Image (tube, rainbow, N blue to C red):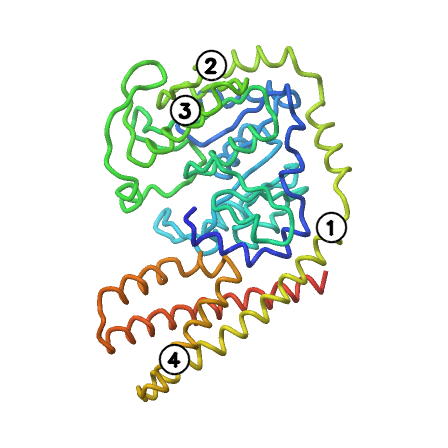
């Protein structure tokens, strides 16, 4: 997630007051164990072993590993996908045909038996409509909780992949032992990057985008081939392990292949499950879920606060639009008298001051604000100054239009519900 992605939460304000936040599950699983399943090529080695964990050890899988689990007859307790981009707008080519990731990962899968699907507060609104038993949401990446009218827990362990979000959740849920499965972060022995049924984009363009390839220490002490992207993901896991060293949380890499992760105990999945099942009670995981669900309170107060927030900022957006139009009109008419320039300066300053009232303008216009400040300092001519101002105002107008449109839709949804 980059900072700009955080503004996408403006399209989900109604959803986050309607659905349950993952923070309600924090510390509820103390003493229990969890397995995070990813679609690395080594998953095939131990996927059947996962059946032994069902009901006693929580199984959470990233969306791209779900199909492989279902094919093996395993329904995870949780499926998670926190990518900020809409799957409906992402495409890849397979068998000579272009297919959307939504069709591939959502429409082509059956989620009816999955207890929880976890999405991001900054994700596409369509992710809140996955046909599963219950939707939960979390807020990974950029900290925005302090800028919203409801309590939002900001997760901090951002490593670049959805599996890092799953790991962060398991830590905050209170699990004593956390194991990684299918987290190769390296190419398989025959060059594959993902498990069967993962059906991920393996185009030359995507492979190049993941950076150069090189060798690192493997799970068994041998050398395996990885790339810049996977290596960064591995480095993030090792950083998390260092941070949690004194926490009492036990970390295991049960991938049985791929990259070696410092700070994790490396063992087989069978060994992990056998040792952790002894301390687990049948169906206790299910009971914890039910207890938290039943304690979920009425969201009427949050809904009212969110409606007031949306209404107030709709008015703010309208004010900003008026000031932007006034400032741009002066430049477009090319009347650069002292009086008009003073008025332009006044309107421009009002735009900036008004934008400071909502943090999402800073997030959405971070690049443009930097360019404006840099440009004004570099070019002191009138033409140069006005050009930089107009570039900024054009971008601000475009963002403000999206801002107002998003809030208008959220206001409608909040009132309809």
Question: Helix, strand or loop at disc 1?
Answer: loop
Question: Helix, strand or loop at disc 2?
Answer: loop
Mark 1 to mark 4 CA distance (whole Å): 45 Å
Q: Residues within 10 Å of mark 2 (few under 14, many from 20)?
A: some
Question: Helix, strand or loop at disc 3?
Answer: loop
Mark 2 to mark 1 CA distance (whole Å): 44 Å
Mark 2 to mark 4 CA distance (whole Å): 68 Å
**Looking at the image, which residue is at 30% across and 70% down?**
388
Query: In this figure, which residue is indicated by the disc labeled 3?
Result: 42
**Looking at the image, which residue is at 37% across and 81% down?**
342
Query: In this figure, which residue is indicated by the disc labeled 2?
Result: 268
* Label 2 vs label 3, nearer the camera: 2
Tell me which label, 2 or 3, sits earlier in the chain.
Answer: 3
Query: In this figure, which residue is indicated by the disc labeled 4?
Result: 344
Question: Helix, strand or loop at disc 4?
Answer: helix
Mark 2 to mark 3 CA distance (whole Å): 12 Å
* Residue 230 in the figure: left or right of residue 125: left
Tell me which label, 2 or 1, sits earlier in the chain.
Answer: 2
């Amino acid at each position: 997630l980059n900072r700009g992605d955080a503004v996408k939460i403006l399209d989900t304000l109604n959803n986050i007051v309607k659905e349950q936040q993952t923070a309600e599950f924090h510390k509820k699983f103390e003493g229990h164990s969890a397995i995070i399943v990813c679609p690395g090529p080594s998953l095939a080695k131990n996927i059947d072993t996962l059946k032994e964990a069902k009901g006693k050890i929580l199984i959470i899988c990233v969306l791209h590993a779900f199909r492989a689990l279902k094919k093996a007859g395993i329904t995870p307790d949780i499926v998670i996908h926190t990518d900020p981009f809409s799957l409906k707008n992402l495409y890849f080519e397979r068998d000579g045909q272009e297919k959307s990731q939504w069709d591939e990962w959502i429409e082509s899968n059956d989620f009816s038996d999955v207890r929880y699907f976890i999405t991001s507060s900054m994700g596409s609104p369509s992710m809140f409509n996955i046909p599963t038993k219950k939707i939960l949401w979390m807020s990974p990446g950029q900290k925005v909780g302090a800028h919203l009218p409801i309590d939002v827990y900001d997760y901090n362990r951002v490593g670049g992949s959805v599996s890092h979000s799953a790991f962060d959740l398991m830590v905050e849920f209170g699990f004593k032992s956390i194991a990684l499965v299918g987290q190769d972060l390296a190419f398989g022995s025959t060059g594959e990057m993902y498990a069967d049924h993962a059906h991920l984009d393996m185009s030359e363009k995507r492979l190049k985008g993941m950076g150069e390839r090189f060798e690192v220490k493997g799970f068994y002490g041998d050398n395996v081939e990885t790339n810049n992207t996977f290596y960064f993901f591995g480095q993030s896991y090792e950083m998390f392990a260092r941070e949690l060293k004194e926490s009492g949380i036990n970390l295991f890499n049960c991938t049985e292949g791929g990259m070696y992760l410092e700070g994790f105990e490396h063992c087989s999945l069978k060994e992990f499950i056998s040792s952790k099942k002894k301390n687990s009670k049948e169906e206790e995981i299910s009971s914890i879920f039910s207890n938290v669900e039943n304690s979920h309170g009425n969201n009427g107060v949050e809904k009212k606060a969110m409606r007031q927030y949306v209404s107030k900022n709709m008015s703010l957006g309208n004010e900003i639009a008026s000031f932007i139009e006034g400032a741009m009109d002066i430049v477009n008419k090319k009347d650069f008298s002292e009086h008009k320039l003073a008025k332009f300066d006044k309107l421009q300053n009002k735009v900036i001051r008004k934008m400071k009232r909502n943090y999402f303008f800073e997030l959405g216009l971070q690049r443009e604000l930097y360019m404006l400040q840099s440009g004004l300092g570099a070019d002191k001519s009138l033409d140069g100054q006005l050009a930089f101002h107009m570039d900024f105002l054009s971008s601000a107008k475009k963002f403000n239009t999206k801002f107002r449109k998003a809030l208008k839709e959220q206001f409608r949804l909040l009132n309809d519900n």
